[in-house]
Image (spheres, rainbow, N blue to C red):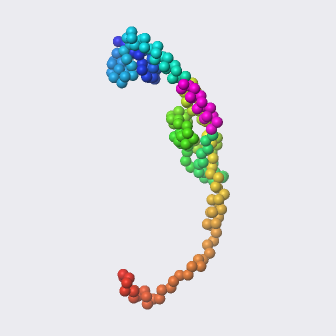
């Protein structure tokens, strides 16, 4: 048996706020009504639907405008991540950049985005530039530039290694020679 309900919140696969939908009576009675996600449609609630639709239209317009502004900010932004690599000859990279790393870096830039909105099939591991889609709104998708680079201090490491490989000079520090008589008879203040 189906009943008509007015939704108070957006429910995926069912409808948005203010929609008049028909659902099974058990679903309404056991889930929607106790969680205050919907109410049974009566003549009074049907009149109230128009007010809810106006509120929803205003809210969705504001969300769409905010998503467009955020998309323009993201498209101007370029995130650069430095990953350790095996060497200049090798393309091997140690570590990877995930959607969580990108979301954290965006948070540092003052942009709060859920990591699930960043479309990333697998972690980024190659040293190159990427363009990633970010779903900000059902109708707005931004393109974010992300670049992975190798550290710039490679030559310094090679110089340091070359210095450490150089033959070592004997130390000029003098060693103290202890006479054998002191070894056999320790001083009274020391424990044997």
Q: Is residue 114 located in the magenta-colored stretch of the structure?
A: no
Q: Residue at x 42, y 19 (%)?
A: 7
Whether residue 4 is visible: no
Q: Position of residue 47 (x, y in %)?
A: 43, 11
Q: Is residue 73 located in the magenta-colored stretch of the structure?
A: yes
| Rendering quarter of residue 42 | top left
Whether residue 137 is visible: yes
115 and 8: which is toward the camera: 8
Q: Which residues are magenta?
A: 62-77
65 and 93: which is toward the camera: 65
- Magenta segment, prevailing SS (helix, strand or loop): helix
Q: Position of residue 187 (x, y in %)?
A: 39, 86
Q: Position of residue 59 (x, y in %)?
A: 51, 23
Q: Which residue lies most toward the top here?
A: 43
Judge left or right: residue 164 versus residue 10: right
Q: Residue at x 56, y 28 (%)?
A: 66
Q: Residue at x 60, y 35 (%)?
A: 74
Image quadrant containing the C terminus:
bottom left
| Rendering quarter of residue 25 | top left
Q: Position of residue 133 (x, y in %)?
A: 59, 32
145 to 1, vertically: above or below? below
Q: Residue at x 62, y 63 (%)?
A: 161
Q: Which residue lies most toward the bottom here?
A: 181
39 to 188, vertically: above or below? above
| Rendering quarter of residue 139 | top right
């Amino acid at each position: 048996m189906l009943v008509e309900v007015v939704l108070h919140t957006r429910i995926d696969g069912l409808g948005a706020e203010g929609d008049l939908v028909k659902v099974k009576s058990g679903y309404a009675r056991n889930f929607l009504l106790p969680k205050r996600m919907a109410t049974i449609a009566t003549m009074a609630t049907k009149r109230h639907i128009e007010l809810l639709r106006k509120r929803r239209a205003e809210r969705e317009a504001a969300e769409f405008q905010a998503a467009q502004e955020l998309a323009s900010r993201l498209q101007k932004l370029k995130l650069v991540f430095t990953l350790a690599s095996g060497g200049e000859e090798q393309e091997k990279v140690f570590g990877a950049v995930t959607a969580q790393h990108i979301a954290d870096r965006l948070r540092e830039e003052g942009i709060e985005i859920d990591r699930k909105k960043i479309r990333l099939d697998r972690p980024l591991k190659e040293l190159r530039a990427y363009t990633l889609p970010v779903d900000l709104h059902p109708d707005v998708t931004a393109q974010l530039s992300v670049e992975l680079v190798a550290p710039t201090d490679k030559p310094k490491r090679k110089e340091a290694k070359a210095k450490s490989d150089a033959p070592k000079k004997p130390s000029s520090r003098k060693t103290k020679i202890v006479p054998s008589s002191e070894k056999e008879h320790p001083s009274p203040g020391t424990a044997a």
